[in-house]
Image (tube, rainbow, N blue to C red):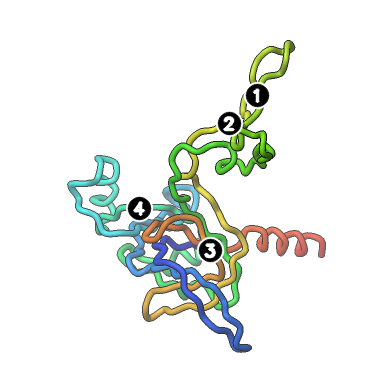
Amino acid sequence: MKGLIGKKVGMTQVFDGDGNMVPVTIIDVNSCIVVGKRTAEKDKYTAVTLGFGEAKEKKLNKPEAGHVKKSGSAPRKFIKEFRISGDDLAKYNVGDAVKPDMFAKGELVDVSGITKGRGTQGVVKRWKFRGFGQTHGTHEYRKHPGAVGQRKTPGRVYPNKKMPGHYGVEAVTTQNLTVVDVLADKGLLLVKGGIAGHNDGVVIVKPSIKLAMRTAHKAKKK
C-alpha cells in the first residue's frame, strides 16, 4: 500500500483535452521524506515511515526524538507508516524525498484529512434536520430539535441521539478521486474535486481501496 503525506494548498480549475473545466485540489508533497523502514527480519513486516513538515528537535517528545536519533533522519512534524512489499522497500533509503509521480494521471485515490472546526452547532447545521414549519404562527421554534424522550417506557434518551454539539474537526476520507495531473518537478499533485480540511492542512493520499478490492475480487473469481 503506497501513500503520500501532503499539504492542501487550495482549489483551482484546469481544462482537459476536450476543453471542459475541471475543479481540482492542489496537494503539495515537497517536504515528504523517508524517516524510517520496517523490515521482515526485524519487525516481521515490511513498511516505510514517511515524515512531513520541518520541525525543531526541541519541539519533539521523547519517543519522537528517540526515533529521529535512531534513524538519523531530519525531525518532522507528522509521521505515518505505509505497508509496502519487500521489493518496493528496497527502493527507499532514509532521507530520500518522496515524489508525487508514484501516482499516475487518471489513477483513483483516497484522500484523508481533518475537517474544519465549526464550533458548537444546532441540529439543523450539524445533522441537516429539516426544522419546524415556518408559518405565521411559528415563534422562536424554527431550529429546535423537537422531542428527544421515549415517553414513559423506557423513560430515557437513547445513546447516540442526534443532538446539538461540537461540529467538525473529524477525520474524513474522500474516496475515488481522480488524479488530474502530476507535477513531479514542482512536487504537486492535482486531484479532481474537493477534500476535507482547511488550506495548509495535512492530508494523506492513498490508492483507492474500493478499486483494489474490486480488482482482488475479480482475480479471485477467475
Depth check: give the residue in front, 69 or 194: 194
Q: Amino acid at mark 3?
A: Gly
Q: Residue at x 73, y 11 (%)?
A: 152
Is residue 105 shown above or below 64? below
Give the CA distance from mark 4 to mark 1: 42 Å
Q: Say which label, 2 or 3, has the lower sequence index.
A: 2
Q: Residue at x 25, y 41 (%)?
A: 61
Q: Nearer the viewer, mark 2 or mark 3?
A: 2
Residue identifier under label 3 = 194
Measuring from the top left, give residue 201's x and y in whole percent. 39, 57
Residue 212, by quadrant, is bottom right
Q: Say which label, 2 or 4, has the lower sequence index.
A: 4
Give the CA distance from mark 1 to mark 3: 35 Å
Measuring from the top left, give residue 26's x and y in whole percent. 44, 70
Residue identifier under label 1 = 148
Give the CA distance from mark 3 to mark 4: 22 Å
Of the numbered discs in the image, which one, if any, rests on residue 163? 2
Q: Amino acid at mark 4?
A: Phe
Q: Amino acid at mark 2?
A: Met
Evaluate if marks 1 and 2 touch, with contact meaning CB atoms under 8 Å apart: yes
